[in-house]
Image (spheres, helix red, strand yellow):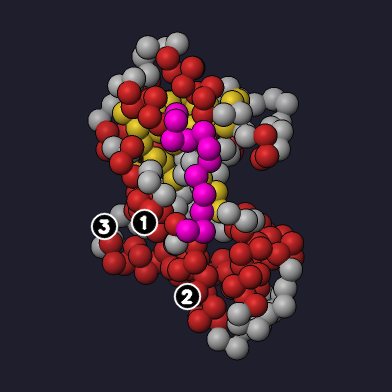
Amino acid sequence: MVKTVFFDAAGTLFETRRPVGDFYADVARDFGADVSGQAVSAAFRRSFGAAPGLAFGAGLSIAEIRRLEREWWRQRVAETFAGLHQFADFDAYFNALFQFFGDPANWVVYDDVFPALEQLRAAGLRLGVISNFDGRLYRLLAGLGLQPYFESVTISSEAGYAKPAAELFRAALAAIGINADEALHVGDAPHLDVVGANAAGIEAVLICRPHQGAPAKSQPAPVISSLAELVSMVRQRR
């Protein structure tokens, strides 16, 4: 029986108000760069796709983890703009960008999220977040009104493992104190959420909302288009 539902964060619970590349380009214009959101998006995808996981070794202080998080993102942004623009003061641009994406005002919660969380919690489910994110996620969850719904938040930078590593999901299980067969994980990335959850023995559900494009015809997990479908699925198993 499902007792706990874990959720991915960005792309599952909320998203940026506009495409990431557009935001990168908008902030860059304040620093003298004339680049298109489309060009930045393409460069960002290449950098992000080839990057090591946003995860660091065990035994580090929170202050050191936060420093490493910023450095990890600084490298990704530098790679993104390597062939697009040379900033007179790159650090000033990066600092502005890092703060921009840590501001809840620049993100929006999907319409189906709050109703689903309310219904799941009312049904006695325990809820958690498992995300390849950094410490800014805590501010985003609080600012977007999501924090009160979650008993645990497990992020890769603090856990020391990034999706699809099974260890990240096992850390989330340990944080709540349940077995893998009592949990369900919902995410939007087959290669991260589904593969990682399954590796830890957790059943996964892939969410693909209509505006996110159609999923591949063959998926190794149930596919839903709304969290309302998740609520129905969980109710049938209790």
Query: Does residue 107 belong to the magenta stretch?
Result: yes
Depth order, front residue of 203/126: 126
Q: CA distance from mark 2 to mark 3?
A: 27 Å
On screen, residue 43 versus residue 63, left or right, reads right
**Which one is in front in this view, the residue at disc 2 or the one at disc 3?**
2
Q: Position of residue 160 (x, y in %)?
A: 37, 51
Q: Which residue is mark 2?
A: 95
Q: Considering only vertical position in the picture, is 78 above or below 228? A: below
> Label 3: which residue?
59
- Neighbour tally class for label 2: few under 14, some 14-19, many 20 plus, Cα within 10 Å: few
Q: Nearer the viewer, residue 82 or 25?
A: 25
Which amino acid type corresponds to the residue marked 2 in the rendered image? Asn
Nearer-the-camera pick, 1 or 233: 233
Task: Tell me which label, 2 or 3, sits earlier in the chain.
Answer: 3
Q: Nearer the viewer, mark 2 or mark 1?
A: 1
Cα separation between marks 1 and 3 = 23 Å
Q: Is residue 59 left or right of residue 217?
A: left
- The type of residue carrying mark 3 is Gly
Find residue 139 and name its label.
1
Q: Between disc 1 and disc 3, whose residue precedes?
A: 3
At x 57%, y 37%, the residue is 188
Instruction: Tell me where the magenta segment starts and ends, as one range.
Output: 105-116
Q: Position of residue 217 (x, y in %)?
A: 73, 26
Q: Secondary structure at mark 1?
A: helix
Q: Can the viewer see residue 186? A: yes
Element at badge 3? loop
* Badge 1 density bin: few <14, some 14–19, many ≥20, Cα 10 Å: some
**Is the residue under label 3 in contact with that under label 2 (CB below 8 Å)?**
no
